[in-house]
Amino acid sequence: MSARDEILARVREAIAPASPSDRQVPRDYRTRTEDGIDRFIERLHHYQARTQRIAAGRLEKGVRATLADRGVHRVLAPDGIPDGWLKNLERLTDTPPLDPPALDGVDGVITTCALAIAQTGTIILDGSAGMGRRALSLVPDYHLCVVRADQIVGSVPEAIAKLDATRPLTFISGPSATVDIEMVRVGGVHGPRRLEVIIAE
Amino acid sequence: MSSGETIWTDDPPFPANAKRAVNNAQLRRNIRKATTTIRERRANLVGEMPDWQELRTSGAAIKDEVLRNLDRYLEQFEAAATGRGAQVHWARDADEANSIVASLVAATGETEVIKVKSMATQEIGLVRALAERGIAAYETDLAELIIQLGHDRPSHIVVPAIHKNRAEIREIFLKEMNDAPADLSDDPQALAEAARQHLRRKFFEAKVAISGANFAIAETGSLLVAESEGNGRMCLTLPDTLISVVGIEKLLPTFRDLEVFLQLLPRSSTGERMNPYNSVWTGVTPGDGPQNVHVILLDNGRTNVLRDEVGRQALRCIRCAACLNVCPVYERTGGHAYGATYPGPIGAVLTPQLVGVEHASELPFASSLCGYCYEVCPVKIDIPTVLVKLRHDAVRTGRHPVEGALFGAAGAAMKGRRRWTRALRLAPLMRFARRGGPPPLSRWTSVRNLPEPPDQSFRDWWVRQHESAREVIRERKRQ
Ligand code: SF4
């Protein structure tokens, strides 16, 4: 018997005596919360991420000024990031795909996101336009993420309901960190050590 | 090598280990400091969730639904993952899983792989098995790196190096990490930076990575890895080949179910509203990440656990380690004393069931039955009830420990059958009456000289225990 068939047979034998069918899973927890932009910002600060709120009409200028202020001149920008955001900066694209040392060599990366969760201070990337493949937001040491105010949902259930599970998803809650030494959270291990979020309203 | 030998180490049995650990003052200080920190953080974050109990109820119900229909969900997962370009393999035991991994790595022609921290790969002894076949596997999680460099063993499910403090970690790095800066300080930030530098080139050059998964979604064939550092993302994203070893109990029916577990897990495990990174992938995504994706579905004793109607709830476990962090026994002995991959309260119920209670007959006694583990468990595993059931099983196998004492002073509480029965009767009551932290040492009901087994069948006896406990509770309420 193949391992597959044998494991399935063992499972069936083990659960056979009592298999009450179709018991409903209770879901009495909250499926939405009132958390909004303020809560989102509070959480990001708790994780040591920087934030700015910028009016949509002034976004171009705001992004450019932010990157310049942070000393980010060679900017990795996936397809879908408007050129206007990067005027006077050196824009690197991922076509053809950059190898990891090249990704490591940029000053920073700018992406958009698919969604954000206020209650947990989480941004979610799904690899569509403006985000690129997963390595882009991972290897560079500085990540600037532009979130539209209408992309912020209150809670985890509201986010899960809107996501496409079959896309590669990355949930990001603050810069790379670890609690492995004495349970003290320290920032800056392998992922970007600086995370900055611009909320465009 | 049988699965039993792999999970269950050849260490001396728990009581001897525990005694040694309890006498190691440095070890106890390190563990107490870390578990105190994490307990407080968890309590705060759970406290701010008005629907925490509802989330726990749903978490338990979702996992029970999976277990009741595990065959169907496994087939569904396989079909969905295969449909999205993953290759799904099945492994009856540790040996088989290790062989599959080794041959998949060999097929790539590589002799080095990078690893994401995973309990399943710990359990099957994968790193050692690969080394025996000439493949070097590098742990990339900071704590796992500390363990690997220190030729040590993990002592905690979430923070494997919890038994080491910063000064000890610095020494390990200076001694074993060839590129550690000579002036390395013991500041956690500096230690993390040293790990970053040490692993960066490995991440960039590796062609093969090995991971586990926190959750596997039957509906979509997706896997999820939760982590903090970004080492997981490096492993899951940069190499060409990704091999994930996934216990068959890791399934969730639908993607929607993540809305429950992504709230329960981070708050319970690291005491965060959300851990820094979660990665979800489904088979192969053209142009993004590994194009050669394998999933190994691992049994290794899990179907034995499933057989037992009382014990199977241990398969709900999402490895958050909250039960370790609150356990008064764990806090004093550390994880190594349990001599197994899964330490603490969950280890005490899971290990004997995975390997057969006759191979781990002391473990069900490595508890005071205080019930704190059940209270914090995000999937409501009634660990004390399972422990008591396993104690009975251990006694029946005739391999029960004669000298089960964990602490001489506390052990007397359990001497003789009458006392044992009384202690058990009190266990649910203690749980009921609990406020705040674990009870003082003096109230422990640790085991010494295991009592005679009850005459009647365990089920009858246990039902009666519960009835009498309920009576006592009712009486108390009346007063
Ligand atoms: S038994 Fe419960 S508390 Fe313990 S690790 Fe598993 S899920 Fe967490």
Image: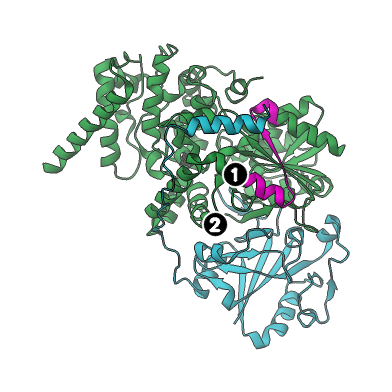
Chain colours: A cyan, B green
SS category of the residue bearing label 2 = loop
The quarter holding residue A162 reads bottom right
Q: Mark 2 — residue?
A: B274
- Residue A41 rendering spot, x and y as whole percentages: 55, 71
- Residue B446 rendering spot, x and y as whole percentages: 35, 24
Q: Is residue B121 above or below residue B252?
A: above
In the image, farthest residue toward the left: B479
Q: Is residue B384 above or below residue B409?
A: below
Q: Residues within 10 Å of mark 1 (few under 14, many from 20)?
A: many
- Which residues are the magenta region? B77-97
Labels 2, 1: front one: 2
Q: Mark 1 — residue?
A: A181
Name the amino acid, label 1: Ile
Towards the viewer: B70 or B408: B70
Q: Chain ID for label 1?
A: A
Q: Chain ID for label 2?
A: B
SS category of the residue bearing label 1 = loop
**Residue B110 part of the magenta segment:** no
B404 left or right of A68 in image: left
Name the amino acid, label 2: Met
B427 left or right of B58 in image: left
Q: CA distance from mark 2 to mark 1?
A: 19 Å
Residue at 47% across, 37% down: B324
Look at the image and tell me whether residue B24 can be seen.
Answer: no
